[in-house]
Amino acid sequence: MKPYRLLYPMRTYLVVAGRGRGTNVMAADWVTIVSAKPFMVGVAIAPERYTWKLIREHREFVVSVPGLDMLNDVWVVGTKHGPEKLRKTSIEFVPSKAVETPGIKGALANIECRVVDERTYGDHTWFVGEVVASSYREDAFSGDSPRIGAGFLAHASWTDFVTFEKRLYRPGS
Ligand SMILES: Cc1cc2nc3c(=O)[nH]c(=O)nc-3n(C[C@H](O)[C@H](O)[C@H](O)COP(=O)(O)O)c2cc1C
């Protein structure tokens, strides 16, 4: 048992970095909100990832929220190295609003970040990005809430993923 698995299930995201033909995507579970105002997001990325080099070079990244329908592509980008892997996926990019790194077409959301800090802890670098723009699918989010049945992905163990049931539980009821 890897001790970090005690924090699972965790949501799974995609991190896009680079631009043009050099754009790359990797899967990432270790993503969290760091600040609400200003909105900042942190991602833990190991230095051996190609994505790490691209974030270091361009100082920006996009966190894309994949749906269950993207699971096969999530697996390819989470197990293979470098932009050539994208030929094995159906991932298409869309221009971002505020950064040069593109978002992913059809993703439930694309969150555009500019790196404001980084620090290496152990075997991962924690990149903190200020969110400079975002976009989302209206069939996935409404008001301030996710539409829980939209197919948000969570990672249970290495090869196993889950999505959320539509039922909501409220404290006190
Ligand atoms: C579901 C899933 C979640 C992952 N989460 C992370 C993560 O949070 N941080 C990380 O450095 N690698 C993570 N990985 C591993 C990278 O996605 C993987 O090493 C990928 O091949 C790196 O691609 P790159 O070298 O093209 O950047 C994850 C892999 C999977 C399948």
Image (cartoon, rainbow, N blue to C red):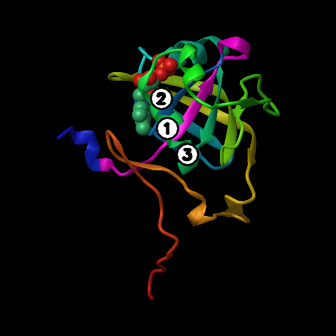
Q: Which residue is mark 2?
A: 76
Q: Position of residue 22 (x, y in %)?
A: 66, 12
> Which mark is on residue 31?
none
Secondary structure under the numbered disc 3 in the rendered image: strand
Q: Quadrant of the C terminus?
A: bottom left
Residue 23 painted magenta: no
Q: Amino acid at mark 3?
A: Ile
> Compared with residue 33, is residue 167 higher up or lower down, i.e. above or below?
below
Q: Pointer 1: what residue?
A: 72
Quarter of the image containing the N terminus? Answer: top left
Range of residues picked out in magenta: 7-22
Disc 2 secondary structure class? helix
**CB atoms at circles 2 and 1 under 8 Å apart?**
yes
Residue at (67, 46) in percent of width and height: 109
Q: Earlier in the sequence, mark 3 or mark 1?
A: 3
Relative vertical location of residue 102 with respect to residue 52 in this rendering, above or below: below
**Residue 127 higher or lower than 31, as above or below:** above
SS at mark 1? helix
Lower position in the chain sequence, tag 2 or tag 3? 3
Q: Dot 3: few (<14), some (14–19), or many (≥20) neighbours within 10 Å?
A: few
Relative side of 59 to 161, left or right: right
Within-10-Å neighbours for mark 1: few <14, some 14–19, many 20+ = few
Q: CA distance from mark 2 to mark 1?
A: 6 Å
Between residue 160 and residue 30, name the one nearer to us.
160
Q: Residue at x 72, y 29 (%)?
A: 93
> Which image quadrant for residue 110?
top right
